[in-house]
Image: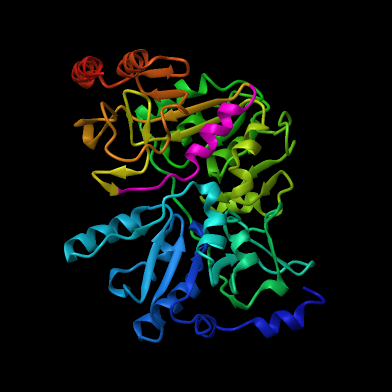
Amino acid sequence: MTGHADTYVAKRVTAEAAVRMIPSGARVVMGLGVAGPPALLRALAARAERGEVDGLSVYYLLAFANAAPVLRTDLRPRIRPVSLFHGALERKLDLEAAQLGLPPVDFVPTAFSQAPAVLSRQVDADVLLTTVSPLDEDGCFSLGTNTDYALAVSRTARQVILEVNPAMPRTRGDCRIPLDRVTAIVENPVPLLEVPPAAIRENDRAIGRLIADLVEDGACLQMGIGALPDAVCAALEDRRHLGIHTELMTPRLAHLMRLGVVDNSRKTIHTGRAVFTFAAGDRALYDFLDDNPACEAHPVDYVNNPTIIARNDGMVSVNATLEIDLQGACNSECVGGRQYSGAGGQLDFVRGASASRGGKSIIACHSTAAGGTASRIVPRLSGPATTPRNDVQYVATEYGVVNLRGLSLAERAKALIGIAHPDFREALEREACAGARLS
């Protein structure tokens, strides 16, 4: 920090002093996931509780427990959450709102790749609140686990308020905020939030093995979050020379790098380096990322740009869905008429992998939901088409994998019924026949 000490000290304040800089009515962008700044968010919630600020809109994507202080029903309308991707917190808030006769959490439909433009231009954010690593010798803060949309917002927001945490890894790539762009600095040396892995069940392992059979040596991987992508990674430990170009860096992907299964040697761009836009997992993952020359963090409008993705030969994307209809369209974000998650980067990577030379786009799901009482393969979607039928390539359940590319509607229905749970195949066949007669 030599040469920057005076400026740094002048901008260093308490969390309480920092949030007093935020005016009522401000449009605030909060760091995604692990980067949600806990000290700043607690101080902002306390200020709202005292009635000292009103009419704030807090925009974000994928909130974890560190964001809970400001995502509260009792703080509305002083703090209005605006989500670009729902998780457990928003689902809980929506249940509370329904019981009180209030509207659900506001939601902005968008692809993850568009989030930087949405937040920095359309929303025109006033304030960025996020967690960073300590200042480096060049006078910059690394965004660590979360470059995603934060870098773009840091360049346009009227106020950039950072929570500096030495537990945040200093990552390499295009992921730094210069000190002269920062309004206020709050130091908070606490353990970084960790995300426990989802339990891998036997049907996850079955799907993981089927998908792994599609992955050749030298392929470049994108994996989503959860037990299914983790099961795929577990089934890839005998591969060689794999690469990584993914929105999310996970402990399982890092494990493949440690094993030497992933060496990024055959990547056609960023050769030798794993590229990601955000990371979530355990302390071992954060330590692995810290100043690791084999990993690079870049903004999501670069990482998730389908044209950039497609430049990786042999790109394999693996993403989960909630339901898929008999024509191949996927709803990956709504359940029972309510927002459950979001589009995220699914369509970004479906299109990017499909355009890659030798690439494969794979949508995976269990064959059933609701404890086996409902089929995930359905006659008609109950929500939006997150991934349109025109874009879907491979679909995998524990009963098999089908490639829908080039199949007619009748052939698609037959193929998808073949990988549905046996208990639902007869009913799906009746629906398919009825649909064919109507058309």
Query: In the rendered view of the protein, which quadrant contains the N terminus?
Result: bottom right
Q: Residue furthest right?
A: 3
Q: Is residue 145 above or below residue 386?
A: below
Count of marks, rendered view: 0
Quarter of the view holding residue 249 = top right
Q: Residue furthest front?
A: 439
Q: Is residue 382 left or right of 33 when viewed as pictured?
A: left
Colouring mode (rainbow / by chain / secondary structure / one colour): rainbow
Write the residue at 28% across / 59% down.
Answer: 104
Query: In the rendered view of the protein, which quadrant contains the C terminus?
Result: top left
Q: Is residue 42 above or below residue 264?
A: below
Q: Is residue 366 left or right of 437 when viewed as pictured?
A: right
Quarter of the view holding residue 124 = bottom right
Write the residue at 26% across / 37% down.
Answer: 382
Residue 166 seen anywhere in this rendered image of the structure: no
Write the residue at 51% across / 48% down.
Answer: 112
Foreground residue among 371 and 254: 371
In the rendered image, residue 20, in percent from the top left (x then y), is placed at: 50, 85
Tell me where the magenta segment starts and ends, as one range: 339-357
Q: Is residue 11 left or right of 325 when viewed as pictured?
A: right
In the rendered image, residue 296, in percent from the top left (x then y), is placed at: 68, 48
In the rendered image, residue 435, in percent from the top left (x then y), is placed at: 23, 19
Q: Is residue 353 magenta?
A: yes
Write the residue at 54% across / 81% down.
Answer: 18
In the rendered image, residue 262, in percent from the top left (x then y), is placed at: 65, 33
Foreground residue among 218 and 79: 79
Q: Is residue 181 above or below residue 409?
A: below
Foreground residue among 384 and 19: 384
Residue 325 seen anywhere in this rendered image of the structure: yes
Q: Is residue 348 magenta?
A: yes
